C-alpha cells in the first residue's frame, strides 16, 4: 500500500483480513493522510491492530523493476518488492496564478489548515477563504472554530452550477452540508466570486470593495497525485487513474483506491480502499458487496468535478509578470510562446524545480491546455547517494 490516508488504511485493513502480508508506507511521520493528518482515529487504530506493517517517513521515488520500488527513508534509499500493489497516493490542491499568489500571506486552503493544525496561531486573524469546492467550507468552519475571523468565502463557481450540485446530493450529504453551513452562519458565501489580486493586508475580488485580511487561503479544488501511477505504466483517463469495478488498474498486479482515482471525498476513499484490499486478496464476496456501494458515490465524484471546474475567466488572472512556476521563478510572460510542457521546460526551466511541476503543471494545463509531459524519476528530490550502486 502506498499512502496511509483513508484509502490506504482501509485497504491495509481489508487485505490483512484476507491473511495477506501487508506493508503500508507513507511519506508522513504517521498515518492519516490529508484529512486526519497525524491524529489517531478508529481507522488508524484498526490498521495498527491488523498486523499490517506501517513504514512512516518513507517516500517512493522510483520504480526499480516490474515488482520493485525505490524508497527513501530519511536519507537512506532502499528497494522494496511487492506481489500486489495498491496505490492510495491521494490528491493535492490546485493553485492558479494571480497577482500576489506567491506572497507569504497567501496559502492554499488545505495548506493553511495544515499549518494551523501544526501550531500557526490563527485566533483573531482575518482570513479570506477563496477558490472552489467543498474544501473551502470545511476549512472555513475549522478556521472559525479555532478563533479566526472569516470575512468572506469566495467560490468561483456559479449559483446555477451550485444549485444542480445540491440537487444531486444524497440525503446524507445534504445533512452534512446543512451542518457545515450552520457552523458557518454569519460568514458571507459568495458564488461567482474570485480573487483578482492580493497584496499584504488585503484581497481584491472580481466585484465589491477590497477586503482587509491577515491571510488569504486560496485553492481551486484538488488534483490526483498521478506521478507514481504514471511511472508504473498504469493507464490514466481524464486526469485520474483508470480502474475497473474492482479498483484494478490497467496493470494486473496494481490496484488504485481513493482520490488518485478522482476526487470524491473521504467516504468514497474508504469504500475504494476496502474494495481494493478485498479484490487484491481474492475476498470476492466482500468485494462484491462494496461494488454497489462504490457506484452510488461515483455519481457524487462526477458531480463534484463538473460543478467546481474552474471557469475560463480564471485563465486571464495572471499578469505578464505573475510567477507561474514558483520553484524556478518563471513568469506568465516567459511561457506565452512555448508550444507545450516540454518546450516550456527547455526554454524556461518551468516545472524543473524541487516540486517537479506538481504546482505549476496543473496550472499550465489549465492556462495553456498543455497535457502533462514525460515523467522522469526521481519523483521527488533525493540525495545523489540514492542512486549510487551498492558495493
Ligand atoms: C491539503 C488537503 C487538505 C484536505 N482537508 C480536508 C478536510 O479538512 N476535510 C475534508 O473532508 N477533506 C479534506 N481533504 C480531502 C481529503 O483528503 C480526501 O477526501 C481524502 O483524505 C482522500 O483520501 P486518500 O486516502 O485518497 O488520500 P490522502 O488522504 O491524500 O492520502 C494519501 C497519502 O499518500 C501519501 N503519498 C503520496 N505519494 C506518496 C509517495 N510517493 N510515497 C509515499 N507516500 C505518498 C501522501 O503523503 C498522503 O499521506 C483535503 C485534501 C487535501 C489535499
Image: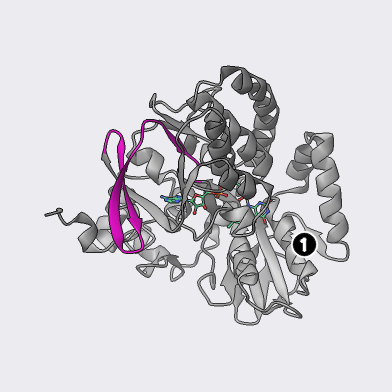
Q: Judge whether residue 84 can be spotted in this image.
A: yes
Q: Is residue 206 left or right of residue 21?
A: right
In the rendered image, residue 356, in percent from the top left (x then y), is placed at 36, 57
Q: Main secondary structure of the magenta part?
A: strand
In the rendered image, residue 13, in percent from the top left (x then y), is placed at 57, 37
Q: Judge whether residue 307 can be spotted in this image.
A: no
Please, what secondary structure does the residue beneath circle 1 have?
A: helix
| Residue visible at 51% across and 21% down in the picture | 282
| Residue visible at 64% across and 65% down in the picture | 113
The stretch drawn in magenta includes residue 66: yes
Front-lying residue, 362 or 391: 391
The residue that label 1 is drawn on is 141
Q: Is residue 33 left or right of residue 299?
A: left
Front-lying residue, 274 or 176: 274
- Location of the C terminus by quadrant is bottom left
| Residue visible at 65% across and 30% down in the picture | 298
Which residues lie in the magenta part? 65-89
The stretch drawn in magenta includes residue 91: no
Amino acid at each position: 500500500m502506498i499512502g496511509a490516508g483513508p484509502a490506504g488504511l482501509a485497504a491495509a485493513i481489508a487485505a490483512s483480513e484476507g491473511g495477506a502480508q501487508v506493508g503500508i508506507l507513507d511519506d508522513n511521520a504517521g498515518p492519516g493522510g490529508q484529512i486526519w493528518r497525524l491524529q489517531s482515529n478508529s481507522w488508524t487504530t484498526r490498521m495498527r491492530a491488523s498486523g499490517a506493517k506501517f513504514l512512516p517517513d518513507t517516500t517512493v521515488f522510483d520504480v526499480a523493476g516490474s515488482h520493485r520500488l525505490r524508497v527513501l527513508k530519511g536519507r537512506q534509499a532502499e528497494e522494496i518488492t511487492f506481489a500486489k500493489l495498491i496505490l492510495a497516493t491521494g490528491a493535492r490542491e490546485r493553485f492558479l496564478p494571480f497577482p500576489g499568489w506567491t506572497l507569504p500571506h497567501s496559502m492554499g486552503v488545505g495548506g493553511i489548515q495544515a499549518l494551523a493544525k501544526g501550531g500557526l496561531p490563527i485566533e483573531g486573524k482575518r482570513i479570506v477563504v477563496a477558490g472552489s469546492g467543498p474544501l473551502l467550507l470545511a476549512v472555513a468552519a475549522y478556521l472559525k472554530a479555532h478563533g479566526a475571523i472569516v470575512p468572506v468565502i469566495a467560490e468561483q463557481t456559479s449559483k446555477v452550477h451550485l444549485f444542480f450540485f445540491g440537487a444531486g446530493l444524497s440525503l446524507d450529504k445534504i445533512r452534512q452540508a446543512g451542518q457545515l453551513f450552520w457552523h458557518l452562519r454569519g460568514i458571507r458565501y459568495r458564488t461567482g466570486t474570485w480573487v483578482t489580486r492580493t497584496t499584504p493586508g488585503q484581497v481584491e475580488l472580481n466585484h465589491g470593495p477590497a477586503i482587509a485580511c491577515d491571510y488569504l487561503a486560496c485553492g481551486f479544488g484538488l488534483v490526483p497525485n498521478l506521478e507514481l501511477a504514471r511511472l508504473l505504466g498504469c493507464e490514466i483517463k481524464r486526469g485520474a487513474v483508470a480502474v475497473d469495478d474492482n479498483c484494478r488498474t490497467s496493470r494486473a498486479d496494481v490496484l488504485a483506491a481513493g482520490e488518485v482515482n478522482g476526487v470524491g471525498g473521504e467516504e468514497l476513499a474508504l469504500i475504494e480502499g476496502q474494495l481494493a484490499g478485498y479484490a487484491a486478496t481474492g475476498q470476492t464476496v466482500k468485494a462484491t458487496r462494496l461494488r454497489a456501494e462504490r457506484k452510488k458515490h461515483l455519481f457524487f465524484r462526477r458531480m463534484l468535478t463538473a460543478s467546481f471546474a474552474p471557469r475560463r475567466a480564471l485563465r486571464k488572472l495572471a499578469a505578464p509578470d505573475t510567477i507561474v512556476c514558483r520553484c524556478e521563478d518563471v513568469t506568465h510572460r516567459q511561457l506565452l510562446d512555448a508550444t507545450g510542457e516540454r518546450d516550456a521546460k527547455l526554454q524556461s526551466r518551468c516545472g524543473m524545480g524541487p516540486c517537479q511541476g506538481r504546482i505549476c503543471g496543473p496550472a499550465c494545463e489549465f492556462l495553456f491546455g498543455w497535457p502533462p509531459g514525460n515523467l522522469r524519476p526521481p519523483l521527488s528530490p533525493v540525495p545523489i547517494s540514492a542512486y549510487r550502486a551498492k558495493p
